[in-house]
Amino acid sequence: MFDGFDIEKELKRERDKKKKTPDALIHAVDSILEESAFKEQAILHTIRHNEPLPELPDEKHLDADMIFSEKEIKTQCIALRLKFLDSRHYKFDIPYEAILKIKHLNEVCGMDLCKFSILAPASEFGRDKKDNHSVLFAWTAQGHYYLVHAWGHKLKWHQKLRAFPLRNFETLFLTVSSIAFITTMSLPTRLITLDHEATYWCGYRIATFFHLLIFYSGVTAYLLVGFNRSFSGSVWKTEKEYD
C-alpha cells in the first residue's frame, strides 16, 4: 500500500485504461489525426525557425509497450506534480545504463537518436539533485515518446495526495471546501453560538462553514501569491519552477 509510485507503471496504467475501452475505431481515427497534426506542426516549426528537424526513429522499430503519448505523460505530470522538459534542462549526469540503451536503440533504428525529454520532479532540474525518480524519453517520428530508461528512488506513496490541491482550480477549491467542512463539523455548538437552545444541526453551523470557507480561501490565495505557486496543469511543461 505504501510502496510509492513508479512513474513507468503509472504511465502504463494510464495507457491501459484506453485499451480497455470499446471505442477502438475512434481511438484509431484519433491516432491518424494526431499523426497528421504532428507532421503539420513539424513543417510549421521548420518554416518559422528555419532550421532542419532531426531525423526521428519510426515506431515500427521500437517496443510498442514502451511508447507513450503526450496526453498520457501530461496526466501523470499533473497527478504527481512532475515536469516534462527537454533533456538539455537536466543539469546532472545521465546514468550509464541509459547511455548503453541509447547505443542499442541507435543500432536497432539505424540512426542516432538526438531528441530527448526527461520526466521528473522539479527538484531534478534544479541545482541540488535529490535522486528522485526520473525517466528519459526519446522522441519518435509519430509524435510520441519512447521510454528509454528510468532511475532514482521511487516517489513517496503520498505524492498524489500532496499534489492533489494544486492540480487545477477545481481541486484547490475542493480541498479548501473540504477543510472548511471538516473544521465546521468538528466544532462544538457552544463555540459557534451563544444561543444555548441551538442544536448541533442549526443555521449557525451553516453560517460558520461559509465564514471559514471565505477565510480559508483568502489564506490560500495569499499563500499562492506569496510563495509564487502555480497549478500543475499550467506549468508541467514549462521551465517555471515549483516544489
Image (cartoon, rainbow, N blue to C red):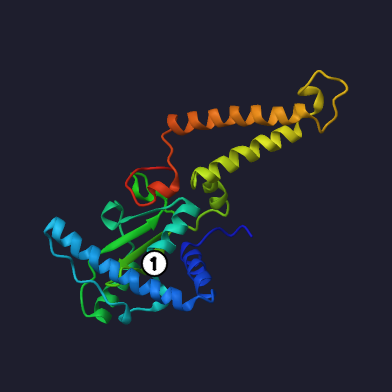
- Which residue sits at x=81%, y=18%? 194
Q: Which quadrant holds residue 52?
A: bottom left
In the rendered structure, the answer to whether residue 189 lies left or right of residue 41 reads right
Label 1 SS: loop
Q: Which residue is mark 1?
A: 69
Dividing the image into 4 quarters, which one contains the N terminus?
A: bottom right
In the rendered structure, the answer to whether residue 213 lies left or right of residue 230 reads right
183 or 155: nearer the viewer: 183
Please, is residue 36 above or below residue 91 in the view? below
Report x, y in % for residue 192.
76, 23
Amino acid type, label 1: Ser
1 or 178: nearer the viewer: 178
Q: Which quadrant holds residue 148?
A: bottom left
In the rendered structure, the answer to whether residue 159 lies left or right of residue 207 reads left
141 or 152: nearer the viewer: 141
* Residue positioned most to the top: 194
